[in-house]
Image (spheres, grey):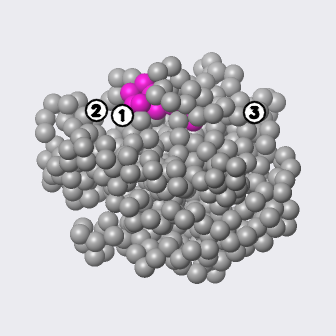
Amino acid sequence: MTDTTWLDATAQAELVRNGDVSPAELVEAAIERVQRVNPEIDAVVRDRFDAARAEAAGELPDGPFRGVPMLLKDMGCHLAGEATHYGTSVLREAAWCWPTESYLARHFRAAGFVPLGRTNVPELGTTVTTEPHANGPARNPYDVGRSTGGSSGGSAAAVAAGLVPVAHASDGGGSIRIPASECGLVGLKPTRARVSQGPDVGESWAGATIDGVVTRSVRDTAAVLDAIGRPMPGDPYVAPPFARPLVQEVGAPVGRLRVGLLDVDPGERYLDHPQCRAAVERAGRLLEDLGCSVEPGTPDAMFDPQFGRFFNVTIAGDTALTISAFERVLGRPVRDDELEPRNAAYRAAGQRMTAEDYLGARHVLGRWTRRMAAWWALPEDGGQGFDLLVTPTVGAPPPELGWFTAEGPEQEGRRINSFIPYTAQFNVTGQPAISLPLHWTDEGLPVGVQLVAAYGREDVLVRVAAALEEAAPWADRRPAVSA
């Protein structure tokens, strides 16, 4: 069989359509890679190999990715009758299985994907590194002593190491883009409500969370979002439709876009590593070569301290609600010592707050969002008329495992916040943002660059990302640990 290890999902699906390889062969090859490589990186925490083999040998839907193996994050995207543990020991020990299938899982299946298992996540997805007490850390294939990012760290490590071409990811404060940056991948956070969270969830984290994937190619990212990005009955709100499928934006002319390069120091409470600044400068030069008008520019509200304070209120409220939901399905209380200290603190804060506290935070964030959005708005609407903002994805290259908790639980939150000056803002505004692997340190560590477009404009991001991929290709990059 053709070696499919480093083929993207689009290429693997084409082999199936042409009869050059069968879905069963693709799946078996991916299973072999997981079994061989995963012990070094701990990206996959639970497999469903027997089910995957049976599905690949059966009548798969004739979708655009028929027979292509993938992995699902161990958070959300429920498969009926199967476990999703959210990185917790309590659900793992209870062997709890979800009774319903999420719309997202249904869309992945309809596209023809075959899920092989679940990937490592931090407990409840509330941090930016994947080091859960329940499963142990996922390890970065570029340096196994370093973080993969989080919360989709296991998915990113698996794709970067060549186990599968695409893996499910989700993003509430950067959890698609951060692991993509740290593992040298493409990570697109879609516009709010582009991907349905039903039927069990209307919105979470006050509408900040969204699902997507991590991939090795822009065309895969575009084509997968075409397959999963559609409204479903009962969704509380929907994203504006595209003029044409996103995959048609790959290779389309970029045009003379107005691009702002981050030109404001985020402040002492945030990391601001020179390698991340260098990544943005290089991206600016590439964009100028593509014909864009590039200039310094940053939304005035980008680093408003009110943002983080009130966003944390919504996270605390939602975390308390999630743990209460687990208690209902388990039929017993969840003790603080069964949670990591970070989540016990979030639950306590969520339980103390009033409805007025929570709704007041959402009101403040709503006003802040309008200030942010004006940067992309047309001048006749009171805006500054930019098409794209370019920032580092995170504040530093991948840190060593254990760095976030090295000073104890009381300092963990400070270190988490210091590492992500640039991502969570766009979960709250709902804007699409993509991390691209455009820079590498002298030690060979990947450093992502984030591009942010106006609400609903993933088409602009895909067009520009595909042009950057052609101008500064990354497909031949291989981590130290890989298939």
The residue tagged 3 is 243
Left or right of 299, for residue 287 = right
Label 1 is placed on what type of residue? Ala
Q: In this view, does 70 lie above or below 38?
A: above
Q: Separation of disc 3 and disc 1 at Cα?
A: 38 Å
Residue 28, percent from left and from top: 60, 38
The residue tagged 1 is 83
Q: Is mark 3 on a helix, strand or loop?
A: loop
What's the residue at 13%, 47% (across, down)? 335
Q: In this view, does 412 lie above or below 32?
A: below
Assess whether residue 198 is covered by the magenta stretch: yes
Q: In which quarter of the image is residue 344?
A: bottom left
Q: Is residue 89 above or below residue 415?
A: above
Report if the CB atoms under discs 2 and 1 are less than 8 Å apart: yes
The residue tagged 2 is 96
Which comes sooner in the sequence, label 3 or label 1? 1
Residue 179, percent from left and from top: 52, 58
Q: What element carries label 2?
A: loop
Q: In which quarter of the image is residue 404?
A: bottom left
Q: Which of 363 and 483 is in front in this view?
A: 363
Q: Is residue 101 visible in the rendered structure shown here?
A: no
Label 2 is placed on what type of residue? Trp
Residue 156, percent from left and from top: 54, 54
Start and end of the magenta stretch?
A: 194-202
